[in-house]
Image (spheres, rainbow, N blue to C red):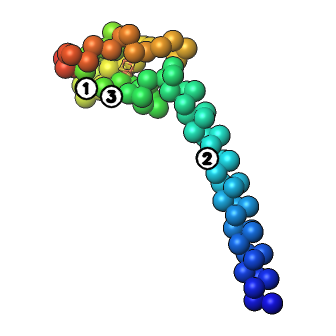
Amino acid sequence: METNNNSADKKRAERSLDALFNIFKEISNHADEVIKNRCPYKNAKSRCTAKFECKNQHYIKKFGEGPVCTGSDLLDYRPAWRTDKKISS
Ligand code: SF4
């Protein structure tokens, strides 16, 4: 009897792990697609958090505010990066 319960628990655990794996696989695949066009330095408020220059940075005159990212989420952002230059202001 105990063995049957253990076997059923093991099968339920395996099904749960399979379901979790499929959920995380879908999330990972979606993230892989999004990262192709959305720069990883762009935060939720569309501010740039990079520590190097980028042609898409637009500075606003507000003390303490980082630059606004003017990059499109539909185009590849990497050609705008100037990683050899530190951010200026
Ligand atoms: S300004 Fe450039 S580096 Fe900053 S978030 Fe936008 S694309 Fe990325």
Question: Label 3 to label 2, Cα distance in Å?
Answer: 27 Å
Question: Label 2 to label 1, Cα distance in Å?
Answer: 31 Å
Residue depth check, mark 3 versus mark 2: number of the one nearer the observer:
2
Expressed as whole percent of the image width and height from the top left, the position of residue 51 reads 25, 26
Expressed as whole percent of the image width and height from the top left, the position of residue 18 reads 69, 55
**Quadrant in which residue 16 is drawn:** bottom right
**What residue is at 21 percent from the left and 16 percent from the top?**
84
Residue behind mark 3: 49
**Relative height, residue 13 to residue 45 (above, below):** below
Report the amino acid beneath label 3: Thr
Is label 3 within 8 A of ligand 1 (CB to nearest ligand atom)? yes
Q: Earlier in the sequence, mark 2 or mark 1?
A: 2
Is label 2 within 8 A of ligand 1 (CB to nearest ligand atom)? no
For mark 1, give the secondary structure: loop
Q: How crowded is mark 1: few (under 14 residues within 10 Å), some or many (20 or more)?
A: few
For mark 3, give the secondary structure: loop
Residue behind mark 1: 51
Q: In which quarter of the image is the N terminus?
A: bottom right
Number of numbered discs overlaid on the protein picture: 3
Q: Quadrant of the C terminus?
A: top left
Residue behind mark 2: 24
Marks 1 and 3: CB-CB under 8 Å?
A: no
Q: Which of the pair 68/34 is nearer the observer?
A: 34
**Relative height, residue 24 to residue 62 (above, below):** below
Report the amino acid beneath label 1: Lys
Q: Residue 18 carries which label?
A: none
**Quadrant in which residue 10 is drawn:** bottom right
Q: Which of marks 3 and 2 is nearer the N terminus?
A: 2
Q: How crowded is mark 2: few (under 14 residues within 10 Å), some or many (20 or more)?
A: few
Q: Which of the pair 5/44 is nearer the observer?
A: 5
Could one spot residue 58 in this view of the protein?
Answer: no
